[in-house]
Image: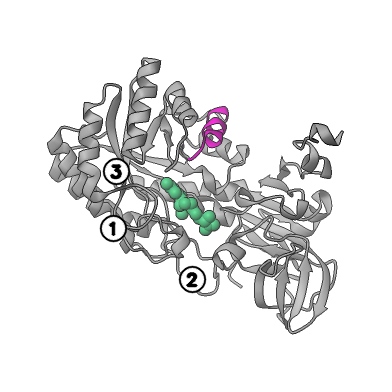
Amino acid sequence: MILPSHLTVRNGRLAIGGHDTVELAKAYGTPLYVTDEDRIRENYRRLADALGGYYDRIQVLYAAKANGNLALFRIFADLNAGADVFSAGELSLALSAGMNPGLLLFNGSSKSAADLALAVEKGVRVSVDSLDELRQLNAAAEAAGKTVEIAFRVNPALEVPTHPKIATGLATSKFGIPAGQILDAYREALACSNIEPVGIHCHIGSQILEVEPFAREMEVVIDLARELSKMGVTLKFIDIGGGLGVPYHRETDHAPTPQDYADAVMPIFLAGIRDIGIQPELWVEPGRSLVADSTILLTRINSIKEAHKTFANVDAGFNLLVRPAMYDSYHTVVAANKADAPPEREYTIAGPICETGDLLAKDRMLPTLTAGDLIAVLDTGAYGFAMSSQYNSRPRSAEVIVRGSEATLMRRAESIDDLTAPMQRPAWQQ
Ligand SMILES: Cc1ncc(COP(=O)(O)O)c(C=O)c1O
Ligand SMILES: N[C@@H](CCCC[NH3+])C(=O)O
């Protein structure tokens, strides 16, 4: 098993950032998400250095949907990153973490009037996803007596090698304005009383393990930048989104490094802007590649069942990690308390949810397991807790963060009272 450097095996037990997972599970209970802050910082640094080696006007915006814990917003604020925020909640968390409003981009294909009013009030830039939204935003800005800087999200109509549910720039996708309509959109924005078009926004999809699609995306946005310059749009930034994948299949996946990514996109960008004669900032919006491998999900085996397969029934299911059920995603699993024992038997790791599809991992060779053993599901820092639910009335787990020799909660576990707290009895039931 090839483990990333922050995951090690000590005395036969898996450790994260040097912290023994068996001890963490004992101290905080299971199921439990554990995140290594230093790994996030390392991932960020590698990307910023690779892009920054080509151009000094680079800005990383953390795609907060990947993991919306306030502690992560704080880490990225400390790194001087901005954020791609996709809701009023993400915007508010980013601001309360002390992020610079000038480094936030309010994205979204379906923003409400309240969302637009909030963006105007907070003075953040908006990625506008339709002409209807543009007109509503202009009206909101006019009512507030302000001017809002925007980008349009362009739909580049690009096929990308990823799961169809997470490709976002297909011609058929709900995101962005079709390339054939985009110049007219900018023309209309230029004519708006309270809108200033200053950027281009594009994002082609997620978990992409090749760099060519990003190069093609860059060509699309550079072509657009050229047309916009002719039209008189002064571009302050070009945002090419996120999407770089991670090697979930630790034995076989080859994920491009941040340097591979930079080498693929930056020469096209630099040649393009030189030719056009502009010097916009280049923004990127990674989520997964910054945080996925920073986190493991620890889950305890409740029972072993011999049936047509051998099931290891654990205490975390798709209530806490929906990716396998939703996208057939693969996550590496490790027997955390038997981490250097040889694989002996095939197990399917099944969650406690009343759904046939509640399987965290299928047909994995692991050491012989018994009730009480601890399973670590790797690479769960992106779209893990962030997509969790209380399905089957299961309180969500705690999240712990480690940094150096310290370990602490960044979210307490929910209790049964947390399930009922927002509920109200109808008056006729009192
Ligand atoms: C607009 C936008 N930006 C950035 C991201 C982050 O993508 P990833 O986590 O794949 O880097 C997403 C998610 O796909 C997105 O929709
Ligand atoms: N939730 C997806 C990624 C979607 C990214 C947001 N556009 C996943 O877990 O892989």
Q: Residue at horizontal 21%, vertical 46%?
A: 224
Asked which colour scheme the image uses, the reply is one colour
Task: Indicate whether residue 237 is drawn in magenta.
Answer: no
Between the C-alphas of marks 3 and 1, the distance is: 16 Å
Q: Closer to the camera: disc 2 or disc 3?
A: 2
The picture quadrant where one finds residue 340 is bottom right
Badge 3 is on which residue?
Answer: 55
The picture quadrant where one finds residue 56 is top left
Is residue 340 depicted above or below 206 in this figure? below
**Left or right of residue 376: residue 176:** left
Decide: few, some or many residues near mark 2? Use Cα within 10 Å; few <14, some 14-19, many ≥20.
Answer: few
Residue type at mark 3 is: Tyr
Circle 1: element type: helix
Task: Indicate whether residue 91 is drawn in magenta.
Answer: yes
Residue 315, given in percent of the width and then of the height, sits at 78, 61
- Secondary structure mostly seen in the magenta stretch: helix
Is residue 326 depicted above or below 381 in this figure? below
Q: Earlier in the sequence, mark 2 or mark 3?
A: 3
Magenta stretch bounds: 86-96
Is residue 43 depicted above or below 145 in this figure? below
Residue type at mark 2 is: Asp
Residue 70, given in percent of the width and then of the height, sits at 61, 37
Residue type at mark 1 is: Ala
Decide: few, some or many residues near mark 3? Use Cα within 10 Å; few <14, some 14-19, many ≥20.
Answer: some
Circle 2: element type: loop
**Residue 339 seen anywhere in this rendered image of the structure:** yes
* In front of the other: 147 or 78: 147
Badge 2 is on which residue?
Answer: 253
Between the C-alphas of marks 2 and 3, the distance is: 29 Å
* In front of the other: 341 or 426: 426
**Callout 1: CB less than 8 Å from ligand 1:** no
